[in-house]
Amino acid sequence: MRHGGHIVVDQLRALGVRRVFTVPGESFLPVLDALFDRPDVQAIVCRHEGGAAMMAEATGKLTGQPGIAIVTRGPGATNAMSGLHVARQDQTPMLLLVGLHAQHDDNREAFQEIDIGALFGSVAKWTAVVRSLERLPELLARAWHTALSGRPGPVVLGLPEDVLAAESDAPVAPCSCVARPAPDRATMERVASMLATAERPMVIAGGPGWSEAAARDLASFATRFDIPVAAAFRRQDSIDNRHPCYVGHLGLAIDAPLAAGVRDADLVIAIATRLDEITTGGYDLLRSPGQRIVHAHPCADEAGRSIPAALAVVATADAFTAALAGLEGPASPRPWAQRRRDLRAAYAAWSKPVARPRPARLASVVRTLSDTLPDAAIVTNGAGNYAAFLHRHFTYKRAGTQLAPASGSMGYGLPAAIAAKLASPEVPVVALAGDGCLMMTVQELATAVQHRAAIVVVVANNAMYGTIRMHQERTFPGRVSATDLVNPDLVALALSFGAFAERVDRADAFEPALQRAMASGSPALIEVVVDPEAITPAATLSEIRAGQEPGAAKS
């Protein structure tokens, strides 16, 4: 006989879980007790449930298996919502376990009582409360399967106190294999036929399930057909950015030639991406008359959902890219070869840093990261204008090296970096954050120190919420409101946690500081003091305020 906590942990072990992220709560004390007896399942003690949920999401994104967060009811569960929303919009497998009040107090508004379904129903793929200890293994296995199947995403399972405290001899439940849909021969023959008649084809790559094999297969297909490949929003690691067919990132304020190239494409092959609002420029880039779209996605309901598709294909990224790589190449050069070269040249020009105000030009800092980090290094970020410099100037070389929230969540970079370092301790991990972004989860530096996650956090400090200031100056120039920040001494703050820390105010001082941080062997923070005028990679605040912003396609 085992209590419910042991049943939870044993089922997670059977599913292959080796790490859970938690802020401890009295509602799931039996689970904490079981973790004491199972040292092969590491409990990462976090400082905020939002950080724990983001670490679980990043684990799911990096490994392809659900990341696990365990939180308590009421405020613990609501705090975790931010990470759950990232998992939803980023199509990441994740499992949130929530300790609940005892069932005999249902519907009394007991202490911290919440309705799991009502609270998480619009975000989670499935929510349930375990009412019987005998069914706990079965429901955990189902939650795992649901998080992985079709369009991956978050699942929430409520664990009442009395269920966890009870005892049972319920055995570990087997987990059914998740279907990995692949295109059939007829589908690929149709894709080949569409390619044969296309004049301006393009690939958009992104979404869940990308592996090094998928990236290689995509590169092989792109090389054989000389076809331009663009990355979906914050999925730049789906192909080596050095590949001659890579033509840029469909993110915010994309390069005008790339936007024109997408609009002008007569055939778009979209792989695993949702074709979300940002990737499609507000759903407007893929509306050209006569444009045909092949949309491959592991979920049948997702293919062709946001943008009508001429051919909807139910397939994982791995399966579809392997099928593309197996297509017979053209017998003669395709008419779009020059178009691919032009788009690549435009990307190369766009990605070069533009001289912006001092101190510490952020574009130069990002280029230093790109040029000095090894190909396998993992780079994370949250949200803010600082991220535009990363997306524009960093060259991603391998699959699984970008952890960035397509949901646009601030505060994500630091917890994601911790999760990445714990999953791959031998790989350098760097988080880029803005001052506003960092302060949303800065307490997780304590988690990094406690668990010896030797990450490097590079924080760009311009003492403002830069994205909102940019929009503010465009819409209401000169009328600054609620975007200035008074920050703590970030170096002193990091040192107080026990991390290595330095401040740089010149771009040429960054690389030596980076080398010292990486050699420190401990979590490290480098504060980069940036000029508030350098609000975007292409425009200053003064230019935006005066309506003289250099041209770019604004999505």
Image (cartoon, helix red, strand yellow):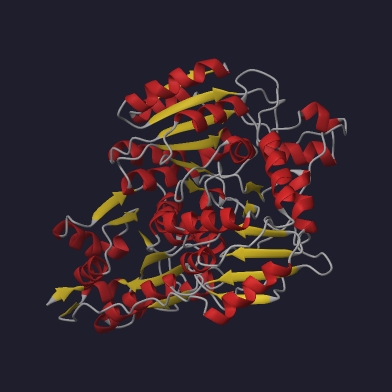
Q: Quadrant of residue 467?
A: top right
Quarter residue 94 falls in: bottom left
Residue 302 versus residue 337 in the image, above or below: below
Is residue 197 left or right of 85 when viewed as pictured?
right
Give the image location of residue 415, x and y in percent. 43, 45
Residue at the far front: name it.
331
The image position of residue 158, as x and y in percent, is: 38, 72
Residue 155 seen in the figure = yes
**Which residue is rendered at x = 56% and y = 52% of the image?**
235
Q: Return the residue nearer the eye: 64 or 36.
A: 64
Query: Residue 47: image x %, image y %?
Result: 38, 46
Give percent across and percent down for residue 293: 70, 69
Q: Looking at the image, which is closer to me, 381 or 111?
A: 381
Q: In which quarter of the image is residue 324?
A: bottom right
Where the N terminus falls, by quadrant?
bottom left
Note whether residue 406 is visible. no
Q: Determine whether, in the image, residue 120 is placed left or right of residue 192.
A: left
Would you place residue 230 above or below residue 392 in this image? below
As rendered, which of 492 and 399 lies closer to the eye?
399
Q: Is 458 above or below relative to 29?
A: above
Taking the spot 37% from the left edge, 63% from the top edge, the residue there is 65
**In this rendering, position of residue 411 left or right of residue 108:** right
Describe residue 449's horizontal placement relative to residue 540 as left or right.
Answer: left
> Number of callouts in the render?
0
| The furthest residue to the right | 547
What residue appears at the point 53 percent right and 36 percent down from the top-left corner?
433
Give the answer, above or below, for where 441 lies relative to 530: below
